[in-house]
Image: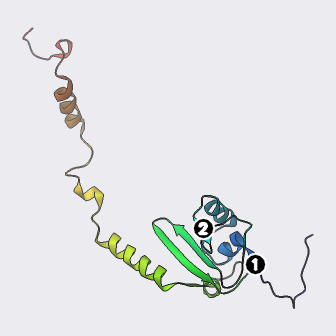
Amino acid sequence: MGVQRPDNQRMDKLRIDKWLWAARFYKTRSLACDEIDKGRVALNGQTAKPAREVKPGDTVQMRQGPQVRTVVVLGLSAQRGPAPVAQQLYQETTESIENRQQLALQQRYAREPALSLAQGRPTKRDRRELEQARHGWDARWSASLDP
């Protein structure tokens, strides 16, 4: 068994991987550890390790896909609870919110790359025509009667 703390003692520090999991940024602690190991999470401006301790007032910056979120730690919880409770553990900075909204707007108005294609994959006939144009007909494969 582990060391148990008395109920009246408050938690003042917690591992960052456990906090990210409890605050519902990642579905499992192992996913949080993987993202931290990849260097996608920073604590107070420095890259973090999974065992690094976080305390209220710290700034956590994490990259999730193209988005970079910056949050200030308001509370600690060693167990994962419902989303409304988890949202009380942090507060996102105004710059982070503005950046997320701007990125969402850019993605909304950006053209879909697939729409720039005139057509999809070439058909079998198109592929044969491309091969013919690229290599020319070989005498062996010629369908004409001329030698």
Residue extending farthest to the left is 146
Question: Dot 2: what SS?
Answer: strand
Badge 1 density bin: few <14, some 14–19, many ≥20, Cα 10 Å: some
Mark 1 lies on residue: 78
The image quarter in which residue 46 lies:
bottom right
Q: How many numbered tags mark residues here?
A: 2
| Mark 1 residue type | Ala
Give 84 or 17, whichever is nearer the viewer.
17
Give the mark nearer the N terminus: 2 vs 1: 2
The image quarter in which residue 121 lies:
top left
Q: Residue 22 location in percent, x, y?
A: 68, 77
Q: Residue 59 location in percent, x, y?
A: 61, 79
Q: Residue 126 location in percent, x, y?
A: 20, 37
Give 51 or 109, whichever is nearer the viewer.
51
Say whether residue 49 is left or right of residue 9: left
Residues tagged 2 and 1 counted as in contact (Cβ below 8 A):
no
Q: From the viewer's perspective, is the residue at label 2 or at label 1 nearer?
A: 2
Mark sitting on residue 66: none
At 23% from the left and 56% from the top, the residue drawn is 116
Say whether residue 127 is left or right of residue 10: left
Mark 2 lies on residue: 41
Image coloring type: rainbow
Q: Residue 133 location in percent, x, y?
A: 16, 28
At 20% from the left and 32% from the top, the residue drawn is 130
Whether 140 is drawn above or below 54: the answer is above
Residue 26 appears in the picture as rendered: no
Give 137 or 22, whichever is nearer the viewer.
22
